[in-house]
């Protein structure tokens, strides 16, 4: 039997492409730990999948900007060290994004078992604006 319940939110913590003021007003700030459990398959959400190419473009633009700036700095400066850390972080997320573009597809969602699809679509109800 059990209790029927849902969690409503505007965005998944993995990001679905909100930008600017929209992000500040509607974003999920990571305070819904339910979506971090693997069985909810949040990375197979259609909005997340659709946002991946935009995220990749934005990450690559940020990487290029920082690499260009790094060329103008003294290698041993505090700012250069900070920039190198940021570049390392961005490259990590570019790799994650590429992996997600390969692995997170609508087809993968369709291949989930009936119960996994139910976890994904019934428990966390995304409320697009």
Image (tube, rainbow, N blue to C red):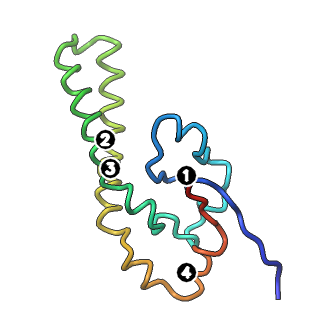
In the displayed structure, 88 sits above or below 41; it is above
Looking at this view, is 21 or 41 the one in front?
21
Identify the residue position indicated by label 2 in the image.
59
Name the residue: 60% across, 65% down: 37
Circle 3 sits in a helix, a strand or a loop, which is it?
helix
Residues tagged 4 and 2 counted as in contact (Cβ below 8 A): no
Name the residue: 62% across, 48% down: 30
Identify the residue position indicated by label 1 in the image.
13
How many other residues sit within 10 Å of disc 3, few (<14), some (14-19) or many (≥20)? few
Spatial distance from mark 1 to mark 2, Cα to Cα?
17 Å
The answer to which quarter of the image holds residue 65 is top left
Query: Which numbered tag is attached to residue 117?
Result: 4
Q: Quadrant of the N terminus?
A: bottom right
Identify the residue position indicated by label 3 in the image.
54
Residues tagged 2 and 3 counted as in contact (Cβ below 8 A): no
Looking at this view, is 57 or 103 the one in front?
57
Q: Residue furthest front?
A: 129
């Amino acid at each position: 039997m059990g209790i029927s319940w849902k969690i409503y939110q505007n965005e998944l913590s993995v990001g679905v492409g909100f930008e600017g003021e929209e992000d500040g007003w509607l974003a999920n700030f990571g305070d819904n730990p339910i979506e971090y459990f693997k069985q909810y398959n949040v990375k197979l959400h259609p909005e997340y999948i659709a946002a991946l190419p935009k995220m990749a473009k934005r990450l690559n633009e940020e990487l290029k900007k920082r690499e260009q700036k790094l060329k103008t700095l003294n290698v041993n400066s505090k700012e250069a060290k900070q920039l190198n850390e940021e570049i390392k972080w961005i490259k990590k997320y570019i790799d994650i994004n590429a992996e997600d573009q390969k692995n997170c597809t609508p087809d993968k969602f369709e291949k989930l078992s009936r119960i996994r699809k139910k976890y994904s679509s019934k428990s966390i109800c995304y409320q697009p604006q």
